[in-house]
Image (cartoon, grey):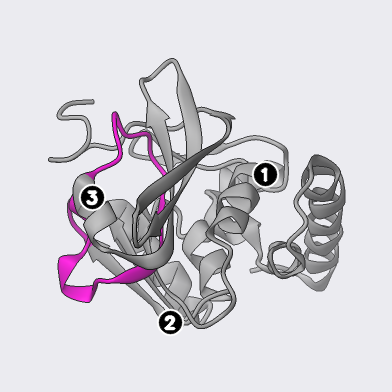
Amino acid sequence: MDTSQNIEIYAAQRFQMVQYQLVSRGIQDERVLKVMSEVPRHLFVPESYRHAAYDDCPLPIGEGQTISQPYMVAIMTQCLELKGKEKVLEIGTGSGYQAAILSKLASHIYTIERHVTLASRAKTILKQMEYDNIDVIVGDGSLGLTEKAPFHGIIVTACAPHVPECLLDQLEIGGRLVIPIGDPYNQVLYQVLKTKNGVESRAILECAFVPLIGEEGWKTE
């Protein structure tokens, strides 16, 4: 349990994270910056790594997975261009931190995780923190979530070999898909906009993610 002193320390660390890792690198969406300054990232990492929760790096969370670097969470969130009333699908729940950020910026979040232990842990943390507009689902995220489609935004927090066609099908016209594409050694984060005439893709930056495992992703780790 956090003491009042720890709460103040973590708040100061979040402020520094936002100023020196996000603003300085061009994150401009004021809503994203505000939420990143408020959500307690340290509660989503194992206790042994909480001293580094606001550092400029990813951290292990078990099952060979990581919680993404704060800047990567911010840039991916900003690329969704959320206004507040959207329904968003996240592929790769992991720690639950990205879902928590999204839940403050959109109407409802569906997040899929293939590791039962991670999904269970994230669900527990999110419930304890009273994020009541998030559904955590165990399954193959590469297939999306057809029964809840269409989505205004889809965010994939694992690297895919290509853009899964099923995710594009589940995206509404005017919606955005944010996804890292590549192989284990060379990856690029893309923002994909679905229009009446097809899709428009924009490369954002080079990145490094764990592989997206599933029917429309990588078949083996």
Q: Name the residue tied to disc 2.
A: 133
Q: Say which residue appears at 25% left-offset and 63% top-offset.
A: 170
Q: Which mark is residue 114?
A: 3
**Image check: 92 left or right of 44?**
left
Helix or strand or loop: what does disc 1 sit on? helix
Q: Dividing the image into 4 quarters, which one contains the N terminus?
A: bottom right
Position above or below: 154 against 172: above
Q: Dividing the image into 4 quarters, which one contains the C terminus?
A: top left
Q: Position of residue 35 (x, y in %)?
A: 69, 68
Q: Name the residue tied to disc 1.
A: 71
Query: Badge 2: few (under 14), some or many (20 or more) residues near its Cα, within 10 Å?
Result: some
Q: Say which residue appears at 57% left-offset and 57% top-offset.
A: 77
Membership of 4 in magenta stretch = no
**Image check: 128 left or right of 148?**
right
Q: What's the amino acid at mark 2?
A: Asn
Q: Which mark is residue 193?
A: none
Q: Which residues are magenta?
A: 138-164
**Image check: 65 left or right of 60?**
left
Position above or below: 19 against 21: below
